[in-house]
Every structure is written in C-alpha cells, then in structure tokens.
Amino acid sequence: MPVDSFPPIRRLGVDDLKRCVALSINRGWPPERAKWSLLLAACEVFGVDAPDGKGLAGAVVLARWGTDYASAGMMLVAARYGRRGLGRELMEHLLRAAGDATVTLFATDQGRPLYEKLGFEPVRKSVSLRGRFRASAGSFKGVRAATEADLPAILELDRAVFGADRGPILSRLPSFADRIAVIDDGGVTGYAAAWRNEPASTVIGPLVAPDGAAARLLVTELAAHTATPIRLDLDPDRRELPGWANAHGLEPTGITVVMAHGKLVARGVPERLYTPISVALA
C-alpha cells in the first residue's frame, strides 16, 4: 500500500488514548497509558488512522520547548503497515510543523537510518540502566520531598538549566509523577521526579542537579520510596552516574543515540542535566 493510500495525518487528542496504547502494544512496547495521557495533553501528537479501521496505522509526538527548540518521540508504525513510507511521512509532517526549530530525538538502531536520511545528525549516546536500586548508608541532608509551593522555583531552575521552557510538561509533573524531590540549599538548586512506567518500573527523570553528588542524593532519595525497579537514561561518557548506578544494582539494557535536526546551539547549563523527562522527550 503506497503512502498516499493512507488517510491524511491528523492531530490526535485525548480521545485517542486507547488507540495510542494499542499501537504501542502492537509494536511490542509497554502500554504506557499514563505517559500517553501526558503527551496527548501537553504535546502535539500526529497520527494516521488505519485503513482497515482498526486503530492507528502510525503516530509521532512533537514537544515544543519555546519557539526554537523541540523534540520528537514515540514514532510508531503498526507492524502490518511497516516498510511503506508511513514513518517517513509522519516525520516529515512533524518537521514541517516544527518550522525553523531545532528538533532532537532519541534514535534506536532501527530508526536511525530513517532519521539520517531526513537530515538528523548524532549528538551523543544515551544508555538505559535498569534494576533494583541497592541503597548505601548515608545522609539525605538537604534533600526533601517537593511540595506544590516548589513548582515555580522548579520551573525557573529548569528553564535556566535546560535553556528553554519545558513548562507545558513540567507543570503537569505534580499530578503525573509518583514523587518529586528537591535539593534545598536555602532555595531549590536541584530536583528530580520519579514516575511509574509499564511494566512495573519507575523512571527517574528529569534529573537536574548542581553536581554529581547532588544528583546521586536525588536518585537515592527517590529510590528509597520506590518498590519497583529503577530506570535511568544517562550519557555514558559522563562519569558522575553510570558507574555509580551500576554499582548500586542497575544494569545497562540498551543504548540509543541522541540526534538533532537543525543547528544545535549552546544553551542553558548542560552539565547540570543528568536525565531527560523521558526518551520520548529529548
């Protein structure tokens, strides 16, 4: 079936949640209902209805970080419609929608050839580490659970460190995450969120901290309140966390490549960014 035989690409909404979940399951991904709900509410999700009337043929998510920066994620095509150009059509639609903004994404080995054809270039690697976190004895001094009153400070800190506004997503963290922790040193200087993923695991992200020691404190504090295995998505070339996480029970389970389409200008304070919100939101 040629790509022009598919229905037109449309903007998906919250009523499409079940279709997005079914698409994830079709490709062997976890259902991720909570994450799909967040993305449908806070991002631009584009999709194509399946010609056979059974759900979606494909979907992709565009998250805008201000006016000149964005991310792409959750690019999925139903197995029965693979290799027919639909993935490329969805990505080209997303890039047109993004306009002049630089777009980043996490690319698997399977998706990377398509992204390279579209002009994406590699920026760095990312490794996923998962497992049951083994905490060592130590003090959580300066780390506490976040409250609703901390949200303005978290948003201000994140905007300065990330170098763009992630408010549309981060403002929903209090209702989305299981727990948010902050480094309080007379003011919020770091924060991290833990949120439940499917199957039973907990992602820690985003993680913003003034240094590696503070980042490790935030991970330890959040892991102490989590009964499920932990997932961290880290830059393997940075020394602060990967080896430490591995020593505390987390094993590498996969490597992706962060790629960018457009000029990636220096912004924010990248050395204070340790994990993304999600690999769906580069």
Image (spheres, rainbow, N blue to C red):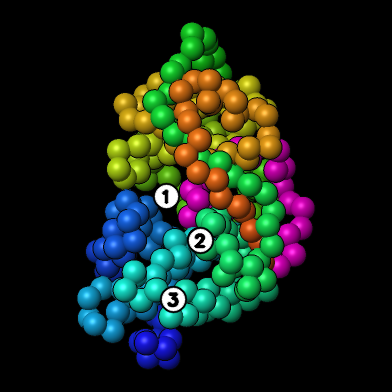
Q: Inspect the image, locate mark 3, and give the three-letter code of the amino acid beneath it.
A: Arg
The answer to which image quadrant residue 261 occupies is bottom right
Q: Which residue appears at 55% of the width and 37% of the height? A: 207
Residue underneath mark 1 = 172
Q: Secondary structure at mark 1?
A: loop
> Alpha carbon of mark 1 to alpha carbon of mark 2: how far?
31 Å
Residue count near mark 1 (Cα–Cα under 10 Å), binned few <14, some 14–19, many ≥20: some
- The first of marks 2 and 3 along the sequence is 3
235 falls in the magenta region? no
Position of residue 80 measured from the top left corner of the image (x, y, whole percent): 31, 73
Residue underneath mark 3 = 83
Residue underneath mark 2 = 110
Q: Quadrant of the N terminus?
A: bottom left
Vertical position of residue 27 compared to residue 59: above or below = above
Please report the bounds of the magenta region as a residue range.
262-282
Q: Inspect the image, locate mark 1, and give the three-letter code of the amino acid beneath it.
A: Arg
Q: Quadrant of the C terminus?
A: bottom right
Is mark 2 in CB contact (under 8 Å) with mark 3?
no
Left or right: residue 146 compared with residue 186:
left
Q: Residue furthest top?
A: 137
The answer to which image quadrant residue 260 occupies is bottom right
Q: Inspect the image, locate mark 2, and give the three-letter code of the amino acid beneath it.
A: Gln
- The first of marks 1 and 2 along the sequence is 2
Q: Which residue appears at 54% of the width and 57% of the height? A: 109
Residue count near mark 2 (Cα–Cα under 10 Å), binned few <14, some 14–19, many ≥20: few
The answer to which image quadrant residue 177 occupies is top left
